Image (cartoon, coloured by chain):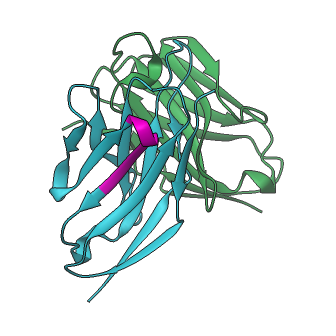
Amino acid sequence: AQSVTQLGSHVSVSEGALVLLRCNYSSSVPPYLFWYVQYPNQGLQLLLKYTSAATLVKGINGFEAEFKKSETSFHLTKPSAHMSDAAEYFCAVTSNQAGTALIFGKGTTLSVSS
Amino acid sequence: DVKVTQSSRYLVKRTGEKVFLECVQDMDHENMFWYRQDPGLGLRLIYFSYDVKMKEKGDIPEGYSVSREKKERFSLILESASTNQTSMYLCASSFREGLAVSWGEQYFGPGTRLTVT
């Protein structure tokens, strides 16, 4: 069965520093991978979606993620953190089975300090 | 803009009460989902629906039921609330895309924080 692991439940960076949030999926290549963000007291919103059209996916707010099949990874990056990036980030993967729903990682909380 | 609304942001109920959480989407999405979110556990799927009157169990359906009588509305029911159902409940919806329910982008409501005392 498909699964997803987010390494690090908390990541802290300084404003202007590189943001790297890690996500690994299980060995079978999923059709789609997603990154969602949840700001305090809000629901989740889509940051970006991988659909196999390109390995480097650009999302909203300057985030991007690279799909690496050899490493079974889909890490999220942003070159320069902003205070407003402080939120919880979730990686999610799909499966090929018709009746199954999205599988979420446990989430990574990003803190940004000035 | 896609809008998913949930009936309450905060709810406090007593043990044993029957609880209804309502979710409405305005984008004519085929799929709707109920998750619960707990610290350190991420999102866990309770139930989902891919059409009116159709429902499928997710990972943690025990103690919950759902109803989808109209396409835009998906209700989560706690038949007899217990303290271990204290949690944040998130509703989401998506278009049908391809083979699997999971393939489309999901749009989330703001969540209902339920406390059962």
Which residue reaches farthest front?
Answer: A70
| Residue A14: quadrant of the picture | bottom left
Query: Above or below — where is B97 with respect to A22?
Result: above
Who is closer to the viewer here, B83 or A113? A113
B15 sits to left or right of A20: right
Q: Residue at x 47, y 28 (%)?
A: A94
Query: Above or below — where is B105 with respect to B81?
Result: above
A51 sits to left or right of B19: left
Who is closer to the viewer here, A98 or B88? A98
Q: Is residue A42 magenta?
A: no
The colour chain B appears in is green
Query: Can residue B26 be seen in this snapshot?
Result: yes
User: Residue A64 appears at what percent x and percent y?
Assistant: 23, 51
Which residue reaches farthest bottom?
Answer: A114
Q: Residue at x 37, y 51 (%)?
A: A75
| Residue A54: quadrant of the picture | top left
User: Residue B1 appears at what percent x and percent y?
Assistant: 18, 38
Q: Is residue A74 magenta?
A: yes
Spot the cyan chain and give its letter: A
User: Residue A9 appears at what percent x and percent y?
Assistant: 54, 65
| Residue B107: quadrant of the picture | top left
A11 sits to left or right of B86: left
